[in-house]
Image: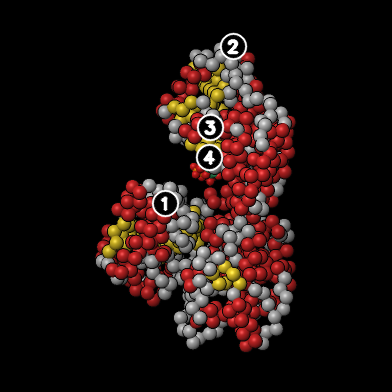
Amino acid sequence: MIETKLHGDVLEIVLAHPPVNALGEAVRKGLYGAIADAQADDRVKAIVIRGSGRLFSGGADITEFGQPLVPPALPEVVDATEASAKPVVAAIHGLALGGGLEVALGCHYRIAARGAKLGLPEVTLGLLPGAGGTQRLPRLVGIETALGMIVSGVPVSAAKAAEIGLVDRLADEDRLVEEAIAFARTLNEPRRTGERSVPADPALFERFAVENARKIRGLDAPQACMEAIKAATELPLDKGQEKERALFASLVAGDQSRALRHAFFAERAAAKIDGLPKDLPLRPIARVGVIGAGTMGGGISMNFLSAGIPVTIVEMTQEALDRGAALVRKNYEATAAKGRLTSEQVEKAMGLLTPTLDFDALADCDLIIEAVYENMAVKKEIFARLDGVAKTGAMLASNTSYLSIDEIAAATGRPQDVLGLHFFSPANVMKLVEVVRGAKTAPEVLATGMDLARRIGKMPVVAGVCYGFIGNRMLIPRQSNADALLLEGATPEQVDRVHTRFGMPMGPFQMADLAGVDIGWHRDPERIDSLRDALCAQGRWGQKTQAGYYDYDEKRKPSPSPVVTEAIDAFRRKAGIAPRAISDEEIIVRTLYTMVNEGAKILDEGIAQRASDIDVVWIHGYGWPRHTGGPMFWADQMGHETIVEALERYAHRLGDAFTISPLLERRPAGSDFP
Ligand code: T1G
C-alpha cells in the first residue's frame, strides 16, 4: 500500500494501491506513519511522495463512503503532511484527482510530469473536496480559479497547473522522480499554505452563481462547494476546514451523492459481461462498413472516423451518398468552428471515409453496421446479401432500435457473427450504445462489440433481444400513458413540464418533436387512428416542420399550439371523453413509475444483466437526471412498495393489458433491485 525508499537524504514515499492508488484506510495509515517516522529519522532531510503505476492517485476510496470512518481520516493525513518539519514534494504523473490532489496540496511543493492532469472532481460525486481542497486551493491559485476548478470538477493540464501556481515545476515523464528528488534536496524548509483567509469581492460569488445557474440548478454539491470556498475568504485555514468538513458530512449522507456514486460504479459495472471469461480473444476491427448514409449512418461513421478507424459507407444512390458524406463533413466543420477540432483533424477523419455505391466494397470490412430504416424485410434482405459479401469472421451488426436481432441473424448463415449495435441519435454525440446479444451471438463477438464501443468513447450496455431492448421498451408505457393523458385532460406542456421539473432534458412530447413525430408513422394521411396520426397527416412532423405537438419559431422556440389543442378536443369528442383535471402526481405515476415497472420486467426476463445497467441506459441514452441515480436506483430509494401502491391506485387508468412486474411486487419492503 505504501512503499518507502531512501535516496541519500531524501525519502521517497510511494502510494502503491492499484489500480488507482485510492486513499483507502491502509494507504492513509501507511502515509501517515511514513510521514511521522520521517520526522524522527535524522537520515531524512526531505521527502518526495509519488504514485505507483499510471497515476499519482484517483482520490479517496469512494467505496468507503457511507461506512464508519477508520482513522486517520484523510484531512488528518493531509494536515500531518503539511505540518512536516522537513520539506515534502509531490511528484505527480498521470492523474492527481480529489483527495489525491489534496494530498499534493498538503505537500510543500509540487512537480508534475508534462502529461499529468490535476483536478477536484468531487462535485461529480455529489461531494466537495473534503480534505482541505476548498481551503488550500483558493490560497494557492486564487478564488476565481479555485471556484472554476472545484464547481466544475474538470481537471487542468500540468501546463495550466504551472501557469496558475498549482505546481512549481514541470518534468519529463521519464525523469519525474529523479528531478523531484533533486529538487527536494535543494529545499531547506517547508512552505505551508497560509493560515490567513483570502479576501475576495463578495460579488464574485454572486456573479459565478448566476453564470452557472443552469448547470447547477437543483444540485446540492455545487452550492456547498461555493459555500466552502467562500469560507476561505472569511475564516482562517483551520476554521475554514471545519466548515468544509461539516458541508462534506452533509453531502456524503445525502440522496444526491449516493445516487451519483451509484452512477459512477454502475457505469463501470456495465462494462462487465456476466458469464464471459475475462481474457476472451477479441476479433480485430481494422475497417468498418456502414450501410446507409442517413443521419444515423453518418453519425455512426463519425464515431469510428474520429477514433482513426477507416469506414466504407454504402448507399443506394449517388445523391444519398453525397448528401451523407456532406453531412459528416458539415458536422465535423461545426465542431471545428467551435474550436474543438483543427481543420487538419477534420481532413484526417474525412480522409478515412470511403463513400461507395458498391455493396461488394464491404468485403474487406471486419465489422459491418446496417443503419437503414426500421423495416424488418429490408434488414433481412440486406443481411442475406451481406452473407454472400462479407468476409469470413466479419461481424455483422444492425443499428435497429426495436427489431429482433435473432430474426435478422436467421437471414444469414452465420448467426454467431450477428449482433445489435443500437446507437442513440445523434449517434456522434450520445454516449450510449446498446450492444444486443442474439441467442446465437458468439461470446467473442459480444465482447468485441463491447470493447469496440468503449474504444470509440461510448458507454456500452449489454441488452437481450426484445421489442425495444432496454431503453426504448421502457419508452413504450411512458408514451402510451402520455398520449392517453392528453385525451383525458392534460396538455403537452403539462406532461412535459412534469418531466423537465423532475430533471429530464425534455418531456415526451418535446422529445417526439425533436426526434420526429412521423417516425414509425404508417404514412397514410387518410388513416387517422390517433392524435399522432392526425398531426402527421397535417404535416406536423415536429421541429423539422416547425410544427408538431408544439409550434416552433425560426429559432425552434416551442409554443403551445391552438391547432393541437383543437385536434385533442376533436379526439376527445370522437372518443366521448370528458376532459378532467390531471394532477402532476398522476402524470409521474403513469409515465415514470410505469417505466420502472417495465424496467423490472426487463430485469426479470434477463434482457438487462443488472438493474444498474438500466440506470446507465437511461442516464446516457435519454438524459435521466444523474443525481437521482437512474430509474431503478430512484425506485430503490423511493421504496418498491410506494411504486406498487401507486400503480395499483391508478390501475384503472393503465389499460387492461397492464400488469405489475412480479419482481416489483415480490421484493420485500426496503429491498433494492438486484
Ligand atoms: N475509489 C474507489 N475505487 C475507484 C476509484 C476511487 N476513487 N477510482 C476508480 N476506482 C475503481 C473503479 O471503480 C474501477 O473498479 C477501477 O478503480 C478502475 O477505474 C476526500 C471525497 C481515476 C480517471 O472522483 O475518475 O477524493 O471496475 O475503470 O478508466 O476530497 O477511475 O475495476 O472494479 O475508472 O482508468 C474523487 C474517480 C474521489 C476519481 C481512472 N476522485 N475515478 O479511470 O479506470 S472522492 C474521483 C476516476 C474524494 C476527497 C474526496 C477514474 C480514473 P473496477 P476506472 P480508468
- Judging by the rendered image, the residue that carries numbered circle 3 is 164
Counting from the top left corner in percent of width and height, residue 635 is at 67, 60
Counting from the top left corner in percent of width and height, residue 617 is at 54, 59
- Judging by the rendered image, the residue that carries numbered circle 2 is 42
Counting from the top left corner in percent of width and height, residue 37 is at 62, 19
**Disc 3 residue type (three-letter):** Ile
> Which numbered circle lies on residue 155?
4
Of the pair 214 and 644, the residue shown nearer to us: 214
Of label 4 and label 3, which has the lower sequence position? Answer: 4
The N terminus sits in image quarter: top right
Of label 1 and label 3, which has the lower sequence position? Answer: 3
Q: Could you give the CA–CA distance between mark 4 and mark 2, rounded to whole angstroms?
A: 38 Å
Residue shown at 60% from the left, 51% from the top: 215
Task: Determine crowd level at label 4: few under 14, some 14-19, many 20+ residues with C-alpha closer than 10 A.
Answer: many
Counting from the top left corner in percent of width and height, residue 310 is at 32, 54
Residue shown at 54% from the left, 64% from the top: 471
Between label 1 and label 2, give the one nearer the viewer. 1
